[in-house]
Amino acid sequence: MNQENDHNVSQMRERYLWGADAESRLKEGIQKIETDLKEDIQRVEADLKDRIQKVEADLKEDIQKIEENFMNAIQEVKENHKRLVSRILWVGGLIFAGAVTIVAALISKG
């Protein structure tokens, strides 16, 4: 009896695994895999979009900081240039005034 039961169980298992239900189970399995893959793809796409947006925002922020620093550096160079020109003119004026004074003194001595 035990052998007969084992044989029956074995036959039932074969029918279950290889019978008409196998094709429908296979189709269901394939559909589940396709559905899971589509969901995974959607999650990955959404994650990539989020990451791309974050990188774009970070890049824009970095570019703004660079532009601000560049503009500040340009302004500093302009101010330094103005101070330098002003000092050169001031020193030039002193030299000219000194030269005029010396020439006037030489002329007046005669």
Image (cartoon, rainbow, N blue to C red):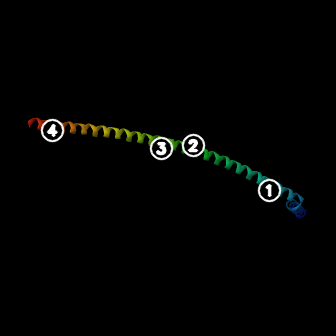
Q: Amino acid at mark 1?
A: Ile
Residue 81, image quadrant? top left
Q: Amino acid at mark 3?
A: Ile
- Frontmost residue, 100 versus 10: 100
Between circles 3 and 1, the one closer to the viewer is 3
The residue drawn where x is 26% and y is 37% is 90
Q: Do we see residue 89 in this rendering?
A: yes
Question: Which is nearer the N-term, disc 4 or disc 1?
Answer: 1
Q: Which residue is mark 3?
A: 66
How crowded pointer 1 is (Cα within 10 Å; few <14, some 14-19, many 20+) is rated as few
- What secondary structure is marked by label 1? helix
Q: Position of residue 43 (x, y in %)?
A: 69, 48
Q: Amino acid at mark 4?
A: Val
Q: Which residue is mark 1?
A: 30
Q: Which residue is mark 2?
A: 57
Q: Position of residue 15 (x, y in %)?
A: 88, 61
